[in-house]
Image (cartoon, rainbow, N blue to C red):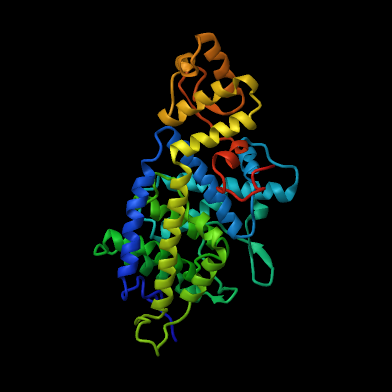
Amino acid sequence: MALDHTAIEPILPEQRLSVLEDLACLVLEQAARLAGKVREPLRADLAELTRWMHCYYSNLIEGQPTRVRDIETALQKDFSAEPAKRDLQQLAMAHLSVQRWAADYTGSPFQEEFICELHRRFYSELPEGMRVATTASGVKSPLEPGVLRTTDVEVGSHVGPPHELVRGLLAHFGRRYEAPELSRVRKIIAVGASHHRLAWIHPFRDGNGRVIRLFSDTVIRQLGIDGGGLWSLSRGFAVHRREYYGHLANADQERSRASADDGRGHLSERGLREFCEFTLNTMLDQIGFMERLFELDTLAGRIEHYVRLEGGFGKDAERVFFLLREALYRGEFARGEAGRVVGSGERTGRSVLTKAIEAGLLKSDTPKSAVRLALPSKVLGTYFPQLFPVGQLEG
């Protein structure tokens, strides 16, 4: 079948929509509930932790897992002397840098300009030796950041559309997904649809997977269903990696002319509908997972467990926990309140507060400003079990 710029049609499922619409409404409800779980400024710190999570799992999908402790040390400009580990740290830093930029982006995420800028910023952050494209046969060649591919590609079973069509396909992609008649519910359904269609176009010679997940992250934020920045679709796709790739491949299929429910476009509507349903269920799974982690009473219990059994505070463990619990429930508190919080005098309160800060469990913007919970990698396995795979928090 000859292809043209409309080859990504259908851009949304048109048949049997009720299941998808119901799921999209649940996403709206649950994301709004998650956003109200924690107070500022703790929410902002948890949103940064979620960026770590998005970065970790997006790289994991690509077969390049970076240990969380290595991400933490890279942010402190402490890079490993081991080349392979250092490369992974640099990948993580590039990913986090692009995420922070995209978090403030207010333009359309569906336009070629934005999609190319994601790619340009990601690869520009990497050293020259890592700016390479790798063919299916393993041949490497230099990659220019942000430049659309000028060759044809084949990745696994997916044969990308001819490179001459990429720009036209992206223009059609932008027009269709920005259509003013799309309701908010349909735009939520379109998170999965646009994710697949952009993957099918395969705009770049390499780096498409990471760019597309960054793109979807931006769409989710702009739709206001990111729960205050507290959940990651990439984690869900990584946890269900086999199903993710399976549904992507099914949606790659051309329309079955023998089936009445497979739409009228070039690509399979049934495959797209199944990928959208998978994506919406993955969103709900991840929002629910994070909502359970952020239940304040149970989180307080896990914090207490860490302080008493892992923190090494001895007789001061209970008082340290009182300070952390105060920060959890209130978001932050003034240093002068430490004595009241721990139920003792000002000197004792100040001493316990210093211990908690020196242990990295509380932090503040200045030596005199209010203190809030800190989230070093050493506590994540206890505070937030299963957020990252077992064994990935150590250096």
Q: Residue furthest left?
A: 181
Instruction: State the image quarter where residue 384 is shown.
Output: top right
Q: Residue at x 60, y 56 (%)?
A: 60
Outermost residue, bottom side: 258
Residue at x-position 38% and y-position 82%: 262
Residue 184 placement, left or right of 173: left
Residue 56 can be seen in this image? yes
Quarter that holds the C terminus: top right
Q: Residue furthest right?
A: 82
Residue 185, percent from left and from top: 30, 61
Q: Quadrant of residue 73?
A: top right
Quick check: 175 left or right of 395? left
- The answer to whether residue 306 is left or right of residue 223 is right
Q: Residue at x 50, y 12 (%)?
A: 344
In front here: 312 or 169? 312
All told, the count of numbered labels is: 0
The answer to whether 369 is drawn above or below residue 93 in the figure is above
Where is residue 272 shown, x and y percent of the image? Answer: 41, 73
Q: Position of residue 57 (x, y in %)?
A: 56, 54
Whether residue 175 appears in this view of the structure is no
Query: Measured from the top left, where is residue 390 in percent x and y?
Result: 64, 49
Tell me if residue 258 comes above or below residue 160 in the rendering. below
- In depth, the one of 284 and 45 nearer the eye is 284
Which is more toward the observer, 46 or 73?
Answer: 46
Q: Image quadrant for the N terminus? A: bottom left
